[in-house]
């Protein structure tokens, strides 16, 4: 089983709260992923917070991600909780940092794949999609 790590950084000329609002709202993530994305289960204390579940993609290839931890304006931790085969142990963390000219987002994704060579393909495709989406919302 090979382990993979995808690391993405993007700066924004917007404040942390505005970018956090965009990236923490499940129903607004379609702009990042370019795929349908919607909340299918509300969180324990807030709709998009801990315990919430979002579905990304179109059946039968859709995945469901569950929010594991969230600190408003600081970080979001999540994992794939349904679908995503052959990916295993997929976890992500999005961190938000204030900068003098706006904010910076650091997005780390960790996953395992049992098929040799597939991890590099997933890193490329997922990395490209997230970078393209973050660049789009940075331009707003």
Image (cartoon, rainbow, N blue to C red):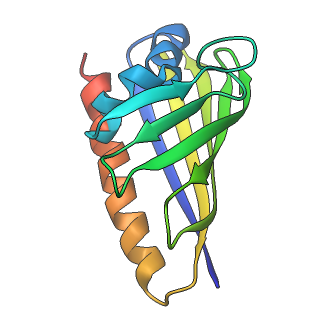
Q: Residue 94, relative to residue 114: is it above or below?
A: above
Residue at the spot x=25%, y=29% of the render? 136
Q: Position of residue 130 (x, y in %)?
A: 37, 45
Can residue 100 be seen by looking at this rendering?
A: no
Q: Position of residue 56 (x, y in %)?
A: 40, 42
Viewer-side residue, 113 vs 10: 113
Viewer-side residue, 83 vs 14: 83
Residue at the spot x=53%, y=22% of the render? 24
Q: Position of residue 27 (x, y in %)?
A: 40, 21
User: Which quadrant would residue 22 be assigned to in this image?
Assistant: top left
Looking at the rendered image, the quarter that the N terminus falls into is bottom right
Q: Residue furthest front?
A: 60
Residue at the spot x=38%, y=56% of the render? 126
Q: Residue 14, relative to residue 2: is it above or below?
A: above
Q: Residue 3, relative to residue 26: is it above or below?
A: below
Can residue 133 be seen by looking at this rendering?
A: yes
Q: Residue 4, relative to residue 31: is it above or below?
A: below
Viewer-side residue, 61 vs 127: 61
User: Which quadrant would residue 95 be assigned to in this image?
Assistant: top right
Q: For this view, does 14 lie left or right of residue 137?
A: right
Residue at the spot x=56%, y=42% of the render? 65
Q: Position of residue 79 (x, y in %)?
A: 64, 48
Q: For this view, does 14 lie left or right of residue 98?
A: left
């Amino acid at each position: 089983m090979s382990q993979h790590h995808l690391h993405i950084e993007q700066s924004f000329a917007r404040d942390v709260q505005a970018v956090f609002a965009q990236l923490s709202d499940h129903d607004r993530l379609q702009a990042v992923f370019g795929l349908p994305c919607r909340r299918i289960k509300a969180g324990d204390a807030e709709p998009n917070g801990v315990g919430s579940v979002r579905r990304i993609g179109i059946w039968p290839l859709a995945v469901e991600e569950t929010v594991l931890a969230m600190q408003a304006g600081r970080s979001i931790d999540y994992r794939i909780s349904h679908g995503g085969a052959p990916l295993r142990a997929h976890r992500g963390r999005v961190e938000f940092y204030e900068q003098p000219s706006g904010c910076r987002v650091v997005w780390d994704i960790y996953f395992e794949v049992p098929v040799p060579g597939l991890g590099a393909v997933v890193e490329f495709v997922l990395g490209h999609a997230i970078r393209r989406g973050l660049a789009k919302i940075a331009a707003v």
